[in-house]
């Protein structure tokens, strides 16, 4: 549980830094690219050349899953941007958070993880809370809703987490950093191509925020992988998702002087109940 909490804190720090960078950066994809550069460099030194270029029998698994994970990481971000243009802000944000359904369902069906009744109830409460906290009648137009894009976003948002679960089950814990290197290196290469095609300039602010965002991004992913070694995925992914919502919301109240609506306050109360039930 310790590593899961640390992963939540790092992921929340990532969201806070992204929120802070909004008024400074002009190229969101350029910032993302620099973030992946930072993650790749950290993963390279964390893994060491001996592990990345090793003859370890599980290296091919780490490479294969890492490439898919890297593609999922970047494509979910790009699809989120496109969805916001097509479906407004609220529904894409909700569906991206509901991506936790993908690794949770995979863990139940493929790896036969069996949550208890209390955990199932907690999971359902968490899903309802995510929908509630992101619901807003003014969040965007519901005309010509493109549900296919939203479902694709949900699947891609959860695909990276599925690769983490696959690596925990089929790969080697010794190659955790190598697996992360392959993820971020793949995402980095693809993101640099997208940045070039969009003709976004990588300026000083993009470099600065990209690099400092990359640190919590990498360690959030690493600690979640470590947490999966000792906790079932049906606990890790829902707890991680709703835990980040709590921390980021509280940070918004303190750091950015944001105010909670009654709906959001109710959702946070539901999340606290869900967290308790998921970890019973």
Image (tube, grey):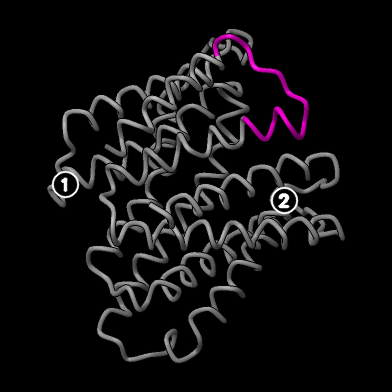
Q: Residue 153: give x, y in percent of width and height.
A: 45, 36
Count of all numbered marks drawn on residues in the image: 2
User: Is the C-beta separation of discs 2 and 1 under 8 Å?
Assistant: no
For mark 1, what is the residue? 113
**Residue under the image location 31 percent in, 41 percent down:** 102
Under circle 2, the secondary element is loop
- Image depth: mark 2 or mark 1 in front: 1
Q: Residue 178: give x, y in percent of width and height.
A: 43, 76
Q: Residue 266: give x, y in percent of width and height.
A: 50, 14
**Residue under the image location 45 percent in, 38 percent down:** 241
Graded by Cα atoms within 10 Å as few (under 14), some (14 to 19) or many (20 or more), the crowding at tag 2 reads: few
Q: Measure the C-alpha gap from mark 2 to mark 1.
A: 43 Å
Q: Quadrant of the C terminus?
A: top left
Under circle 1, the secondary element is loop
- 192 in the magenta segment: no
Q: Nearer the viewer, residue 46 or 166?
A: 46
Disc number at residue 198? 2
**Region of the chain picked out in magenta, as a range:** 250-263
User: Is residue 45 positioned above or below 280 on the image?
Assistant: below
Q: Nearer the viewer, residue 10 or 27?
A: 10
Q: Nearer the viewer, residue 241 or 74?
A: 241
Graded by Cα atoms within 10 Å as few (under 14), some (14 to 19) or many (20 or more), the crowding at tag 1 reads: some
Q: Is residue 150 left or right of residue 122?
A: right
Q: Is residue 70 left or right of residue 265?
A: left
**Based on the displayed image, in which of its 4 quarters is residue 30 positioned?**
bottom right
């Amino acid at each position: 549980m310790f590593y899961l909490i640390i992963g939540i804190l790092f992921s929340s720090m990532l969201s806070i830094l992204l929120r802070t960078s909004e008024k400074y950066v002009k190229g969101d994809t350029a910032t993302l690219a620099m973030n992946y550069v930072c993650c790749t460099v950290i993963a390279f030194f964390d893994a060491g050349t001996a592990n990345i270029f090793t003859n370890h029998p599980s290296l091919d698994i780490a490479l294969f899953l890492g490439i898919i994970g890297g593609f999922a990481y970047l494509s979910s971000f790009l699809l989120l941007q496109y969805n916001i243009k097509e479906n407004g802000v609220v529904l894409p944000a909700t569906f991206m958070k509901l991506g936790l359904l993908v690794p949770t369902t995979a863990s139940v069906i493929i790896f036969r993880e069996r949550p208890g009744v209390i955990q199932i109830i907690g999971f359902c409460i968490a899903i309802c809370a995510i929908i509630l906290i992101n619901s807003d009648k003014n969040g965007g137009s519901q005309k010509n809703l493109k549900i296919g894009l939203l479902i694709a976003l949900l699947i891609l948002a959860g695909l990276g987490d599925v690769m983490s679960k696959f690596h925990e089950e089929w790969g080697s814990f010794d190659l955790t950093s190598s697996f992360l290197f392959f993820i971020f290196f793949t995402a980095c290469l693809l993101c640099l191509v997208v940045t070039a095609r969009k003709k976004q300039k990588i300026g000083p602010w993009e470099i600065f925020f990209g690099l400092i965002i990359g640190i919590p991004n990498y360690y959030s992913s690493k600690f979640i992988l470590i947490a999966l070694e000792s906790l079932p995925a049906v606990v890790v992914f829902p707890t991680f998702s709703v835990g980040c919502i709590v921390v980021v919301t509280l940070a918004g109240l303190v750091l950015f002087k944001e105010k909670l609506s009654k709906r959001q306050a109710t959702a946070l109360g539901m999340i606290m109940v869900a967290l308790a039930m998921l970890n019973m």
